[in-house]
Image: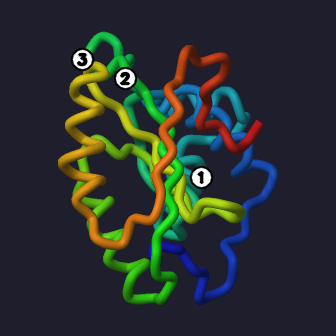
Amino acid sequence: MAKEYQTAEMPVVDKMDLQILKLLQQNARITIKEISEKVHLSTTPVHERIRRMEANGVIKQYATIVNGALVKKGLMTICYVSIKQHSKAAGALFIKAVLEMEEVVECLTISGEFDFMLKVVSENMDAYYNFHVNKLGELDNIANVQSVFVMGVVKQTHQLVY
C-alpha cells in the first residue's frame, strides 16, 4: 500500500529546526538570509539544517498553493470509497489507479464504513460526473462511492509546525 514507513531512526528535529520549519511553512520562498535574521543564527547553519531536513524527509517538498476557482478547478468533492475485496493486491490495484487520476489531489486510507477518502477537484458538476462515471466507476473493485460536495472552505492549511 502507499504508506510511508520509517526504516531507520527517526530524524532528530530540535527547537531551532522547528522555528525554521514554521517560517518555511508560512513562506517557502523566504531566503536563507531572512530565516537567519529571524532565528538569530548565521546563514551557513540555517542552510545546513534545511538541507539535512530535506535529506531526512522532514521537508518532503515545496509547493505553490493555487486558487482552484481561478484555474477552472472550482468544484471540490470528497469521495468516500469502499472496495469489495480487501486483499493487499486489490488495495494496491485501487491505489495504482487513483495515483493516475489527475482529478484526485488527495487519497487517504480511512477506518469505518469506507476504505478510502478522495479529495477530487474538477471544473464543474459535468466534469465531476464524467470523472465519477468514466474513471472511478470503471474500476472493478468498487463496492460503494459516496460523494460530498464542498460548499465552502472555512480553513485550509498545510502547516504542521506552529
81 and 93: which one is in front?
A: 81
Q: Residues within 10 Å of mark 3 (few under 14, many from 20)?
A: few
Q: Which residue lies at the image location 22% right of the left edge and 28% below the top edge? A: 127
Q: Which numbered mark, 3 or 1, is in the foreground of this view?
A: 3
Tag 1 or tag 3, which sits nearer the N-term?
1
Q: Is residue 146 left or right of residue 65?
A: right
Q: Inspect the image, locate mark 1, and give the three-letter code of the amino acid beneath it.
A: Pro
Q: Is residue 74 left or right of residue 117?
A: left
The residue indicated by pointer 3 is: 72
Q: Position of residue 75 (x, y in %)?
A: 38, 22
Q: Secondary structure at mark 2?
A: loop
Can you give x and y, in whole percent of width and height, for residue 41 in the image? 68, 41
Q: Residue furthest right?
A: 15
Q: In the rendered structure, which disc, 2 or 3, sits on the residue that comes first in sequence? A: 2
Badge 3 amino acid: Lys
Residue that carries the numbered disc 1 in the rendered image: 45
Q: Residues within 10 Å of mark 1 (few under 14, many from 20)?
A: few
| Mark closer to the chain start, 2 or 1 | 1
- Badge 3 marks a residue whose secondary structure is loop
Relative to 104, residue 75 above or below: above
Give above or below for 119 relative to 137.
above
Q: Quote the CA–CA distance across marks 2 and 3.
A: 11 Å
- Picture quadrant of residue 68: top left
The residue positioned 24% from the left and 41% from the top of the image is 131
**In the rendered structure, which amino acid carries the disc numbered 2?**
Val
Identify which residue is drawn at 48% across, 88% down: 87
